[in-house]
Image: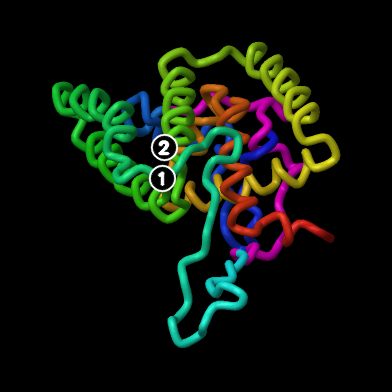
Amino acid sequence: MLIYENSQPGTPAPATTPGTRTFSYDNTPGQSSPAQTGPSSLLGDDSFSAGSESPKQATADTTNPGQDQEEGPRPPVISFAEDGAGDPPASYDMHLSGFFDGREMDAAVRNQHELREQLTAARTGLKEALTEYQVGDTAAREMFAAVKGYVDNPRSPERIEADRETTMAALQKKWGGETDKMIKAAQQVLNEISRKVPGLADTLVATGAANDFKTIVHLANIGKRRGYLQSLWW
């Protein structure tokens, strides 16, 4: 896996140990996770682990040079349109509903109360993360659509490995010599979200979504905007 490990010292990695019990967003609680063999996902390969220290978010200059300081600082001007991410929406509820509503309803109908509670908690955690990172509207829509597609149609181990190679080639073409750092930035963002939404990264890896090109690009851009690339110079 290229982006799926927790690099914080003293904190257990979110990756699944073969045969352990884990929560999956498309199955009942307590399902045995499939054993992973080899680096089959871009998000989770040991060779792309982030540094041992948590990156600090870059602080934007909130003042305008030449501005009369008596007027007070002005909000920083931030562009959210990189790679077509778009501006943050007024609400992420529509994106979340498209992924969670049907699953929560199915869990309720099947009397899977624990699963429904976990799905509700995951919805809340993702909403907090999306809001905190100010994810663009298009980026949120594309990532949810991609993950839903993988969850609804999980890839075989062979397909996951093939997707990894294809996506890696596309990322290298896009980012060139910056590829490793961008993947590490995406990994750091996924690690942070995984602490808010336990089981999310497991689902991305198990279904193959951790190799999705657009998802990796958008996560990397979030990390870049938060200043994580600067922490990767070692």
Q: Secondary structure at mark 1?
A: loop
- The reply, left or right, for residue 121 in relation to residue 50 is left
Q: Residue at x 57, y 59 (%)?
A: 11
Give the extent of the magenta segment: 32-57
Q: Amino acid at mark 2?
A: Asp
Q: Residue at x 73, y 18 (%)?
A: 166
Q: Residue at x 37, y 33 (%)?
A: 30
Residue 25: % across, % down: 37, 30
> Which of the 4 image quarters holds residue 64?
bottom right
Q: Is residue 36 magenta?
A: yes
Q: Amino acid at mark 1?
A: Pro
In the foreground, 211 or 15 = 211
Vertical placement of 211 versus 189: above or below?
Answer: above
In the foreground, 226 or 120 = 226
Residue 218: % across, % down: 57, 38
Please count the marks in the image. 2
On-image quarter of the N terminus: top right
| Number of the label disc, if any, that sits on residue 88 | 1
- The reply, left or right, for residue 216 in relation to residue 2 is left
- The reply, left or right, for residue 149 in relation to residue 220 is left
Query: What is the spatial separation of the Cα atoms under label 2 and label 1, in whole angstroms?
Result: 5 Å
Looking at the image, which residue sits at the far bottom?
70
Residue 95: % across, % down: 33, 33
Q: Secondary structure at mark 2?
A: helix
In the foreground, 12 or 7 = 7
> Does label 2 or label 1 sit earlier along the sequence?
1
Residue where numbered disc 2 is placed: 137
The 10 Å Cα crowd at callout 1, few under 14, some 14 to 19, many 20 or more, is some
Magenta span dominant secondary structure: loop
